[in-house]
Image (cartoon, rainbow, N blue to C red):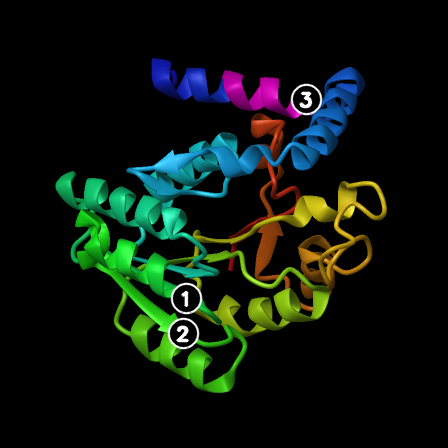
Amino acid sequence: MSNSPLEQFKAEAIDRVKAYQSNEPLQKAYQNFLEQIVKAKYAYNFFWLGVPIIQAPQDLQALQEIIWEVKPDLIIETGIAWGGSIIFNASMLTILEACGVVEHGEVLGIDIDIREHNKKDILAHPMSKRITMLEGSSIDGEIIEKVTEFAKHKRRVLIMLDSNHTHEHVLAELRAYAPLVSLGSYIIVQDTGVEDLPAGTTSDRPWGQGSNPKTAVWEFLKDNNDFTIDKIMESKLILTSSPDGFLKRIK
């Protein structure tokens, strides 16, 4: 029996995307563009439902596709900042619930310092009823215990890491939260692209080449074969802040 037109369309897209990986002019253009948009603070220009969301739009497209595929009833995100990402995740879970594919979808956001004006705006937002916030370090034992308890009765869990971007911190997050990720779901490690930037680009931060989310991912995967890097998602975006950062649980 032949594939449906939609399945054929998806297969064609995958074949096209795989070819991007060896397309040298395209990859050079990506690298040049990445360096320029970091300098220009491109990711700081966007809003989701009125709230600043410090993400490249391409990564939001990826997140939408992953959430629809996984259909989580809990999304855990480390790093809150202005709150745009947790509002985005809450809105996606609202859509899933409206479609009848999840029940009681929730977002759990963790940040070491939730600024009062940000907390006020998040709590005043219509999506806030789906959001719980914890203040503290994402790698603190007490916080990890609270997150684990929160996730205990959830059917499918997806995790996003976007807090402190040093190697040690992200590696500790990966080791702490990987067991919570459901089979077929993802840990999305953001800002792995720091490793690909010219030396000194992030000199005002404690992370940079050699110590960043991508190096943490590489170290994590040496000892954990439950996850694999979803290179198709990364390749289709071309521009992403998370190269090697879309980790899918496969067993």
Q: Residue furthest bottom?
A: 142
Image depth: mark 3 or mark 1 in front: 1
Amino acid marked by disc 1? Ile
Label 1: element kind: loop
| Element type where label 3 sits in the image | helix
Q: Amino acid at mark 2?
A: Glu
Which circle's residue, 1 or 2, is located before the other in the chain?
A: 1
Query: Residue beneath label 1, please?
Result: 114
Which stretch did the figure color magenta? 12-20
Q: Quick one: SS at disc 2?
A: strand
Compute the Cα span from label 2 to label 3: 41 Å
Q: Which residue is mark 3?
A: 20
Other residues around mark 1 within 10 Å, as few (<14) / some (14–19) / many (≥20): many
Q: Tell which of 231 and 159 is nearer to you.
A: 159
Q: Write the residue at 39% across / 21% down.
A: 7
Q: Are marks 1 and 2 in contact (CB under 8 Å)?
A: yes
Amino acid type at image mark 3 = Tyr
Residue 202's x, y, as percent?
75, 50
How many numbered discs, if any? 3
Q: Tags 2 and 3 in contact by the CB under 8 Å rule?
A: no
The verdict on residue 102 being magenta is no
7 or 31, which lies in front? 31
* Vertical placement of residue 95 versus 25, above or below: below
Residue 248, relative to residue 196: is it above or below? Answer: below
Would you name the residue on which mark 2 appears?
Answer: 135
Q: Residue at x 54, y 76 (%)?
A: 139
